[in-house]
Image (spheres, grey):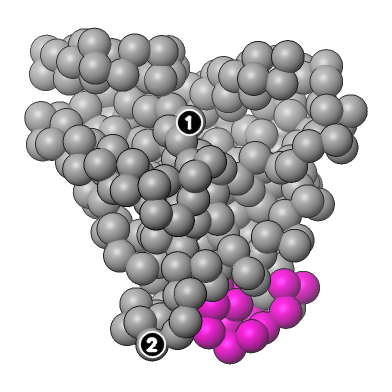
């Protein structure tokens, strides 16, 4: 972790500002699968931890890739997001440390796939995650929620807890159609359940500079969303694809590769964004 810390821009108002305001809770969401959502969650969190932030990942995707990508064995004993949502488990029992200093995770499990149906009969079902986690979030600078690739009750719970949504967007045509649907959903959730919810930003993923379509999609997204689109783009990179099979974020697997450098720059851009909002 030493090298990424050195490469990431320092945050001069780090603890002083965070001590007098709420932590930043970001839902990493896109109803389209395969856009780099979990990869962004894991590696952005790692880069923020490298910048000496206290970071929590909530793995709300039944596939559990954020958990395994951090070396967490989902079959190991212990509580998880399903237990928090539906079994009244304590936050401490569900919290797992990771190999990265300053980064913890509440892992997923296969039972979470049934949670959509089980939540239907619960009063105020959209606030179950907020009720379980909101009192404990103050211990962290950033809380990142890895949402499932669907706009169901699990994602709704994430949006009701979050301050903002960070949207990974693959540089392809169909991704643009899904983005407009997601924006409408965020607007409806804001009106009905969470008035502070906003779009934190859109991050372009799987960018291939050899492909003209990547440039066309990036241009269209920037035209429609302006400064909501991060300057940092995440390139297609084989090391990023290899890292999860080793149970490690790419910043630990190969911090020199183009994918690692991109996530370091994305974290730096997010920190600058937060400093500007706090000014």
Q: Dot 1: few (<14), some (14–19), or many (≥20) neighbours within 10 Å?
A: many
- Please say if 131 is above or below 204: below
Tell me if I can see residue 99 in this picture: no
Distance from the alpha carbon under mark 1 to that under mark 2:
32 Å
Q: Is residue 178 magenta?
A: no
Q: Percent position (x, y) of residue 269?
A: 57, 18
Kindly report which numbered mark, 1 or 2, lies closer to the viewer in this rendering: 2
Residue found 60% across the figure and 54% down from its top: 57
| Among numbered discs 1 and 2, the one appearing first in the sequence | 2
Q: Percent position (x, y) of residue 83?
A: 57, 82
Considering the image in quadrants, where does the C terminus appear?
top right
Considering the image in quadrants, where does the N terminus appear?
top right
Residue toward you, 160 or 231:
160
Q: Quadrant of residue 44?
A: top right
Q: Is residue 90 magenta?
A: yes
Tell me if I can see residue 95 in this picture: yes
Residue toward you, 189 or 81:
189
On the image, numbered disc 2 is attached to which residue? Answer: 121
Q: Which numbered marker is on residue 59?
A: none
Mark 2: secondary structure:
loop
Q: What segment carries the magenta color? A: 75-92
Residue found 64% across the figure and 60% down from its top: 105
Q: Is residue 50 left or right of residue 73?
A: right
Residue toward you, 29 or 45:
29
- Please say if 123 is above or below 137: below
On the image, numbered disc 1 is attached to which residue? Answer: 200
Q: Is residue 198 left or right of residue 102?
A: left
Residue found 13% across the figure and 36% down from its top: 177
Q: Quadrant of residue 37?
A: top left
Residue toward you, 226 or 60:
226
Whether pointer 1 and pointer 2 mark residues with C-beta atoms closer than 8 Å, the reply is no
């Amino acid at each position: 972790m030493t090298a990424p810390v050195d490469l990431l821009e320092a945050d001069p108002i780090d603890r002083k500002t965070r001590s007098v305001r709420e932590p930043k809770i970001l839902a990493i969401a896109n109803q389209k699968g395969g856009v780099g959502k979990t990869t962004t969650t894991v590696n952005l969190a790692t880069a923020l931890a490298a910048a000496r932030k206290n970071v929590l990942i909530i793995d709300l995707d039944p596939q559990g890739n954020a958990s395994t990508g951090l070396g967490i064995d989902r079959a190991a004993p212990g509580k998880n997001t399903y237990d928090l949502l539906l079994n009244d488990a304590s936050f401490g029992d569900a919290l797992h440390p990771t190999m990265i200093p300053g980064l913890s995770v509440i892992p997923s499990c296969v039972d979470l796939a049934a949670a959509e149906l089980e939540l239907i009969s619960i009063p105020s079902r959209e606030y179950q995650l907020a009720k379980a986690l909101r009192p404990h979030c103050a211990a962290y600078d950033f809380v990142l929620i890895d949402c499932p690739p669907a706009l169901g009750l699990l994602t709704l719970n994430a949006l009701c807890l979050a301050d903002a949504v960070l949207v990974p967007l693959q540089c392809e045509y169909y991704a643009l159609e899904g983005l407009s649907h997601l924006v409408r959903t965020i607007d409806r959730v804001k009106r009905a359940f969470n008035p502070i919810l906003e779009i934190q930003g859109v991050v372009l993923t799987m960018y291939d500079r050899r492909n003209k379509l990547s440039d066309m999609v990036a241009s269209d997204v920037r035209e429609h969303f302006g400064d909501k689109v991060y300057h940092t783009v995440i390139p297609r990179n084989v090391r990023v694809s290899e890292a999860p099979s080793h149970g490690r974020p790419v910043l630990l697997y190969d911090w020199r590769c183009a994918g690692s450098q991109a996530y370091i720059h994305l974290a730096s851009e997010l920190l600058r964004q937060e400093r500007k909002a706090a000014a």
